[in-house]
Each structure stands twice: as C-alpha cells, then as structure tokens.
Amino acid sequence: MKMVTNMIDITTCLPCKNRCSYCPQDILMKHYKGIKILTLKKFDEVLKNIPKSVELLFCGLGEPFQNPECADMILLAHSKGHKIRVFTTLVGLTDKDAKKIKDIPFTRFFVHELLNFPDSHRKFSFVTERMTEVELKHFLTSRAGNLYPVPRKPFVSGCNPCSDGVMLPNGDFYICGMDWALKHKMGNLFKTNLKDIKKKEIYELCYYCEYAKID
C-alpha cells in the first residue's frame, strides 16, 4: 500500500561519534553502504521528492549536528514549507549555527543529554527556552533485538511509530529508526518520490520491537 506519511526522520551523517550505549552503531555500520555525509546540495534534491505536508525530524540514526551543514538544511527545509522538529544531544552545534536556527518555529526541539556533555544545552539560550528534555528511560529498550536478544512476539497487530520512516545519508529509506541492521529498505529518496513508496503494516522486525501493538 502507499504510505500515508506525516513525518520522516532525516539522518544527516554516519557513523554517530557520540557512541551512546543504547544505539547499536556497530550493527548499523556493518550493513550501511554509501556516502557518510549528506550534503546540502543532495538534501535540496531530496526535498523535491518529499511533499511539503511531511514534517521533517532531524535525528534518524545519529546526531544531526555532527554534520556541519545541518543548520543550513533546517533553514532550507523551513523555507520550502516543511514543519521541523529536532532530536539532538547538541554535540556539534556551533554558536554560529545556533544563531541561524534560533528563530525557526520548531514543532518540538528535543534534547537528551550525554553523561560526558551534561551542560551542553545551557550555552544556547534559544534551546533552554524552547527545548523538551528527554528522559533516558525512553531509550532503554532492546532496539527491536539489535542490542540484545529478545523473544519473537507471537502476534503483532501494528505499530506505534515515532515517524513514518528514516532516510540515511545515501538516500536509502527504511521503515523506522529501529531498523539498525537495515533489513527493510523501502526505496531511495534520491531517486523516488515519497508519495510513490509503498509500506506494509507489519514487518518481521516488528515482532521484536517494544513499540509494536499487540492488541
């Protein structure tokens, strides 16, 4: 079936250097092929394949601001009419880039802190005023069996997705941010319009995911 899409994740660069214990970067990079950094030029091309009605979540499978052009991507997407939300540790965000995006009317600006950067948000006043801090317990899952083995659910009726798919820097588009082993590719947004990408209700990965519906 064709996707009814409200929001997708944008991964701006790989691998993520934060090395958070709850993100299986090693599994991801074992399977990922292609460019590691999404350029502003390629992102501009991608936006032609994403309807303006689709909200963009800058996060995906890595820290978005580790890409030095992330702030410019946010500005570009906003200028083209997309709603924007961000999920970040703020690692990589510079004073210059913070000034660029301080007036963007973000839908949400999520900040989750790293133990080695406990006060990262306090240097950016626009973040302190508008952010939503995320509790670490949100991440304490198996990442659909990617961090540690979990039993397969006998029945799954659907999903409670954070977004309707995640794009990687090479344009490949996967079902969600739990697909760290890149098993369920749906298409490539460098080549295909999001409107033409089809998505099933349930994938094999869903049977191992803590966010799957079982009613």
Image (spheres, helix red, strand yellow):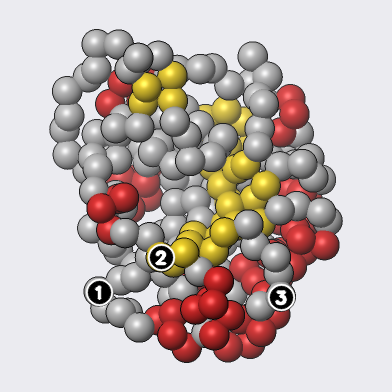
Horizontally, residue 146 falls left or right of residue 7, namely left
- Residue drawn at x 37%, y 22% is 213
Q: Return the disc, 1 or 2, that comes first in the chain's sequence.
A: 1
Q: Which mark is residue 65?
A: none
Q: Which residue is mark 2?
A: 133
* Rendered location of residue 32, percent (x, y): 44, 45
Where does the N terminus fall, quadrant-wise? top right
Could you tell me which secondary element the residue under label 1 belongs to? Answer: loop
**Gap between marks 1 and 2 measured at Cα:** 14 Å
Q: Return the disc, 3 or 1, that comes first in the chain's sequence.
A: 3
Above/below status of 22 relative to 65 = above
Horizontally, residue 120 falls left or right of residue 81, namely left
The answer to whether marks 1 and 2 mark residues whose Cβ atoms lie closer than 8 Å is no
Q: Which mark is residue 103?
A: 3
User: Could you classify mark 1 by the number of other residues whose Cα lies within 10 Å: few (under 14), some (14-19), or many (20 or more)?
Assistant: few
Horizontally, residue 167 falls left or right of residue 208, namely right
Q: Return the disc, 2 or 3, that comes first in the chain's sequence.
A: 3
- Residue drawn at x 40%, y 14% is 157
Q: Which residue is mark 1?
A: 115
* Rendered location of residue 27, percent (x, y): 30, 45
Above/below status of 169 relative to 74 = above
> Label 2 sits on what residue type?
Glu
* Rendered location of residue 203, percent (x, y): 42, 19
Could you tell me which secondary element the residue under label 2 belongs to? Answer: strand
**Gap between marks 2 and 3 measured at Cα:** 19 Å
